Amino acid sequence: MACSHSTSCELYPLLAMEPALKLWKQHYCEGGYEKCARYRLALNGKAVPLTLLPNGKQLAPRSKKEINAAALFNAIQKGRLPLIRSMFKTGVAQTEATTSDGTTPLMAAASVGNAEIINLLLQHNANPFRKNRVGETALSIATRFEHHECVAVLKRKLATSEPADYTEVKVDDEEEARSSIVGFLKKLNPFKSHADAES
Ligand code: SF4
């Protein structure tokens, strides 16, 4: 049985969208969620920080930029348009952040079929020409999922812009923009709790 907190858990969208974290999702969210430190805290009515990992380890926010990228993907997955607007107003959203498979926020919005968020990201210079690691653009993703409104928005933008209108993202910048949570979880063994690891 899957974890009943997945709709409210801030970490879940990252585990669900990030291929490199599939094992974490299977081990906790779709398996032993009762062992998840986040689940147990929420069950007791306590606030659960984004930086608390399922195995009980607390992630030190190494880079605000990386944590912000994770928060943006999370907000997109949950369709929180006003939150994303305020992230742009305070300068914390990055349209060119990516997950390990090269998914950008624009592609994430295309996959969940949210045309309003796509519009907002495009207004903030999200590059519609970018491709993920299997060569898909936001438009091909929206087309694959049959999100017709998103397809129309993206086609309009592509028809009125050129790849040269966008700054090319260097690989180093791309790596830096990735979530530290993803990088951290990838290094840990999901089958070992923090308590086990320290004993
Ligand atoms: S990380 Fe934990 S609380 Fe969140 S959805 Fe997975 S099992 Fe549930």
Image (cartoon, rainbow, N blue to C red):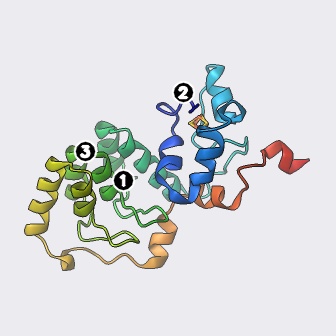
Which mark lies nearer to you, 1 or 2? Answer: 2
Residue found 51% across the figure and 68% down from its top:
176
| Callout 1: CB less than 8 Å from ligand 1 | no
Residue 50 location, x and y as percent? 57, 41
Amino acid on which disc 1 is placed:
Gly
Mark 2 CB within 8 Å of ligand 1:
yes
- Taking the image as shown, residue 56 lies to the left or right of residue 19, namely right
Q: Which residue is mark 1?
A: 91
Q: Which residue is mark 3?
A: 114
Residue 173 against residue 32 in the figure, above or below = below
Gap between marks 1 and 2 measured at Cα: 33 Å
Q: Is residue 62 left or right of residue 170?
A: right
Q: Please, what secondary structure does the residue beneath circle 1 have?
A: loop
On screen, residue 145 above or below 36: below
Q: Residue at x 59, y 38 (%)?
A: 29
Q: Residues within 10 Å of mark 3 (few under 14, many from 20)?
A: many
Instruction: Please give the name of the residue rendered at 58% of the width and 46% of the height, measured from the top-left corner.
Output: 25
Quadrant containing the N terminus in the rendered view: top right
- Using the numbered discs, state the Cα–Cα distance from disc 1 to disc 3 in whole angstroms: 22 Å
Labels 3, 2: front one: 2
Instruction: Count residues near mark 1 (Cα–Cα under 10 Å), then give few for <14, some for 14-19, many for 20+.
Output: few
* Label 2: element kind: loop
Residue 136 image point, x, y percent: 31, 68
Which of the two labelled residues, at mark 1 and mark 2, occupies the earlier sequence position? 2
Which label is found at residue 4? 2
Label 1 vs 3, first from the N-terminus: 1
The location of residue 116, given as percent across then percent down, is 20, 44
> Is any atom of residue 53 visible in this view?
no
Residue at 61 percent across and 19 percent down: it is 45
